[in-house]
Amino acid sequence: MTVESENIGIDASVAKGGAVYLLAYHVPGTHTDLSLTARETVHLNGDSYGTYTYGNNTLDIAGKNVDIGGNKYGMYAAGTDAMHDNTVTVTANDTLAVNGVSGGLYNKQGNLSLHGKNVNITASNGHGIWSVQKDSATSSATTVKGDETIFVQGTGYDAVYSNDATVGLESPTINIKADQYGMRVDGANGQLTASGTTVSVVSKNSSLIASDNGTLHVNADTVSLTSDMEAVWAEGGTVNISGKNIRIAGDTDSATVYAGSSGQAKINTSSGGTFTMTGNLYAEDNGAITLSLPTAQSVLTGWAIDSETGNVNDTVTRSAPVSGRIDLTMNGGTWNMMEKQGSSNRISSLTADGGTVNMRYSTAQPFSDLYIRNLSGNNALFMVDTDIENDQSDRIIMETATGAHKIDVRATGAEPSREAMSNFIVRQDSGNATFSLANPGQKVDAGVWFYKLANRNSSDTSGAQEWFLQRTNERTPTTDSVLGLSGVAGSYAMWYGQLSDLRERLGEIRNRNGSDGIWARTFAERDKLDGLAGTDFSQHLYGISAGVDHLYKHDANNEWLFGLRGQYTSASQDMDGQYGGSGNAHSYGLAAYATWKHASGWYADTVVTWDQFRQDIDTRMTDGTPVSGKFRTHGAGLSLETGKYIPFGNDLFIEPQAQLAYYKIQGADFAMSNGMQVRHDNVDSLTGRLGLVFGRKWTDRQNRFAQPYLKAGVIHEFRGDQKANVNNETFTDSLKGTRVYYGAGIDWQFSRMARLYGEIERENGDHVSRPWSVSAGLRFEF
């Protein structure tokens, strides 16, 4: 029978009936044919079935839009052992929709072919597509083709289920959604294929499942599998996934990709593609999983176990017999290794051309073991954590290994007491693989000292080789920064920059025109300083001070100047050397001074000072990890200076000077952010200075003066011994030594009650040098 029309619509309300109901099974050899063709819409809806074909039937349906539905099945095909030649073809130029309650499409015996621009097959309480081969003498084949999209949904059941039958889906875009399995196949004749540009499966249970010798193929540029439980389940069957970009996400507490009962899960990401998976790999009972991470953008995050019964939790290094197989190929990708409670990661083979195994990704337990039966290729990078002090580490344990590979060990500031690990990081039972540190310079920051990767034969008689960490005699960047910047040299320079000498600090104190004065001074300098244990650094120092004083005339020959000042100093510091490091230092202080001067030119100056210091230290470990630390301390001191102003010639003068200053800086205890512990002892400084000033004084008609001068002298530090304890390692040094200084200055009284004064100066010598120093002050008297 052939029906052609603009539109064809059949709504059948007969109980248990269908819109199209074809039966041909009573008399062998009989056959029923029906063709429905509409230029626009074909609408078929039955009480139970949209289309029902049983026996030998040929049904052709064609239209621009085809809509087939039933309260039981949208499409149903079945037959007897002798009468089962159902051939159903549905073609839609635009939309093809098949929907049912118990199932969208149920092919029990027959060949069903659906083709549309956009194909939607759904079930509200059953399988979207269910294809069954009744017995070995019959066959069932279902083919669905979409020119643009295919959407299949199962509710409460699978979206696509092939039971010993053939099902093929082909479309640029295939979307599968299911409450149970996304696509499932079983039986030796079971073949389920989905191919296109994009295949997406979202399911509550396994996205793809193959069992009982069934085979499931997914082939697309982009494959996305999302499951609340296992994403891929191959139990006695085979799942083949091929694509350029593959994304898999499943339950991270269980196996996301599973292979058992001799099943195989093969995940092949093409060269240049990207594989991304959040979930786990588990193979048992001769099951096998193969997958590749073909590019640097490929990431596997999860655990991998090729046999639960083969797990080893003690120090036995040779892997136990396995009942499953996991083969991983890495070409630049990353495996972020997670931990299964109570189990170690264990894979059968790792073939590397680059790629990273990040063993420190998981925080479930401090350290983990990775067992590899065979490691091959080159340039695999294993990122591990170690605890040298407690002789613990992430470990890579291999039966056989070849190639050259690298280990990246996380740096730490905590200090191990062990000079070498008794445990190991890497062990190979046989093979000629080599391992080196990927850390910069092939060394690991571990407290005060660097550690290197060393090699030895195992202590047992197996002939295995082990790689472990061993101490060197080279200090780490954190150590050098601490020894340089936390020493007293920086604080010493800040104190001495504020102290200076009387002339530099207050200018010319003679010829005053008032009994009270206020003043302010600022200075800047560049210092090159020695820290402890041969370290050195430079700093730019900036300071400001301000004070008030009062002149007391004891008699015609003796005057006393009493004053108070506040002071602030800031320093920007940079470590010299290959590792760098920087710091910032600040000081806040108060001082009181008493200055005596005599009509004969003699003077004496006494200064009592108290300062609070704040020091910040910033550096990086060699692996790039930033490290910082800070502390506060304080200092107090007393300075005594004396000299004599001696005029001669035509307004010339010389002024010999002597100064002795004592300063005590309190020790400090602090910790760096990487765990390094630092303790400094108190430091006493006793500084002596002998100097000479030579200048000339010009006086104008208003009795205002300008007094330029040159200065030079020698400074000697008599004490300055330092002692620091860094992670229980003791370092000592001293600022003792001699240095010379020279400079020039001017004092200008530009009005009767105000003066400007300033200096430039250089200083060179032991432990403390100043390539340049400038200062300027302003004083008012009233």
Image (cartoon, rainbow, N blue to C red):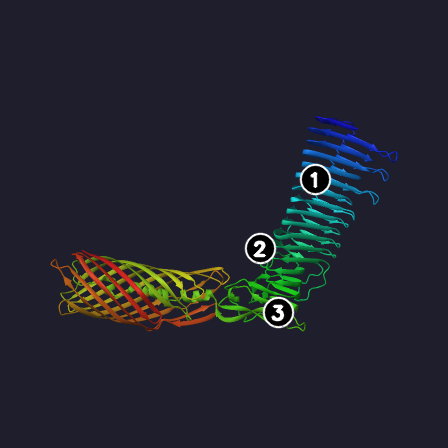
Residue closest to the eye, 285 or 563: 285
Residues packed near mark 2 inside 10 Å, few (<14), some (14 to 19) or many (20 plus) = some
Q: Which mark is residue 466?
A: 3
Q: Residue furthest top?
A: 6
Residue, disc 2: 296
160 relative to 716, above or below = above
Quadrant of res 617: bottom left
Residue 83 at what x, y percent from top left?
85, 37
Q: Position of 493 compared to 120: left or right?
A: left
Instruction: Work out whether residue 70 can be spotted.
Output: no
Foreground: disc 2 or disc 3: 2
- Looking at marks 3 and 1 on the same chain, the residue that comes earlier in the sequence is marked by 1
Q: Do the residues bearing badges 2 and 1 touch, measured as CB atoms within 8 Å?
A: no
Compute the Cα span from label 2 to label 3: 29 Å
- Looking at marks 2 and 1 on the same chain, the residue that comes earlier in the sequence is marked by 1
761 relative to 260, above or below = below
Q: Position of 431 compared to 641: left or right?
A: right
Q: Position of 769 compared to 191: left or right?
A: left
Q: Amino acid at mark 1?
A: Lys
Instruction: Work out whether residue 757 can be spotted.
Output: yes
Q: Which element is circle 2 on?
A: loop
Q: Which element is circle 1 on?
A: strand
- Which image quarter holds the N terminus? top right
Residue 243 at what x, y percent from top left?
65, 49
Residue, disc 1: 145
Q: Which element is circle 3 on?
A: strand
- Looking at marks 2 and 3 on the same chain, the residue that comes earlier in the sequence is marked by 2
Residues packed near mark 1 inside 10 Å, few (<14), some (14 to 19) or many (20 plus) = many
